[in-house]
Image (cartoon, rainbow, N blue to C red):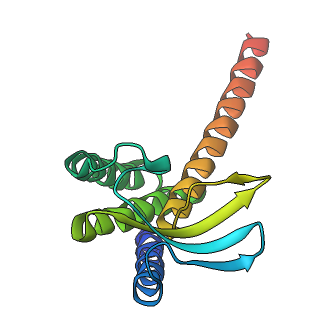
Amino acid sequence: MFLYYILAIFVIAVDQLTKWVVVKTMELGEQITVIENFFYLTSHRNSGAAWGILQGQMGFFYVVTAIVVVGLIYFMQKYARERKMLAIALSLILGGAIGNFIDRLFRKEVIDFFDFMIFRYDYPIFNIADSALVVGVIIVIIMTIIDERKEKRQNDTTAQRN
């Protein structure tokens, strides 16, 4: 399990380093074109959650993040010991949650900078922590679907034998 906590720490470190670089080298609102009409680095701040919801609700985020972190550690210890992909997914979610929590705690806002334009849709600006959270959640969803299918097949096989 130790290696999975190292993965979470790595996510936190990369997240905080990239945010520090953005704060130190870019003005708020400054935009650097990486791929014209597709990918930009934009210095942005968000005092809410995804898509700017719950702006300024720091107390709420502190409580929810604390509960999520405790829950993630519990699930990692109880359920992920024998399941490598689940451990990786939960590590990514843990690192992402803590990465954004650090911003909220010390800056009272989250630093975002990845800015994509996808088919004329200006996707909400996000960061490394957000990316880790999303990838982790996608892995958990895929694993849940796979597990449910396996369980259904096992139940069908058992029913056919009886």
Q: Give the quadrant of the C terminus.
A: top right
The answer to whether residue 62 is visible is yes
Residue 36 picture quarter: bottom right
Q: Relative to 134, does residue 60 appear above or below in the rendering? A: above
Q: Which of 119/75 is in front?
A: 119
Q: Position of residue 50 (x, y in %)?
A: 47, 49
* Residue 47: image location, x then y, percent: 34, 56
Q: Residue at x 43, y 75 (%)?
A: 28
In the rendered image of this protein, does residue 91 appear above or below residue 9? Answer: above
Depicted 12 relative to depicted 135: above or below: below
Residue 37, given in percent of the width and then of the height, sits at: 77, 67
In the image, residue 44 lies at what x, y percent? 46, 68
Describe residue 40's horizontal placement relative to residue 18 as left or right: right
Instruction: Confirm whether residue 83 shows in the render.
Output: no
> At 63% from the left edge and 44% from the top edge, which residue is drawn?
143
Residue in the picture at 65% in, 31% down: 148
Residue sitting at the far top:
162
Q: Nearer the viewer, residue 40 or 75?
A: 40
Q: Above or below — where is 62 with respect to 126? A: above
Residue at the extreme bottom of the image, as rendered: 25
Q: Give the quarter of the figure containing the N terminus.
A: bottom left
The total number of labels drawn is: 0
**Front residue of this view, candidates 13 and 28:** 28
Residue at image x 76%, y 53%? Answer: 120
Q: Is residue 138 left or right of residue 27?
A: right
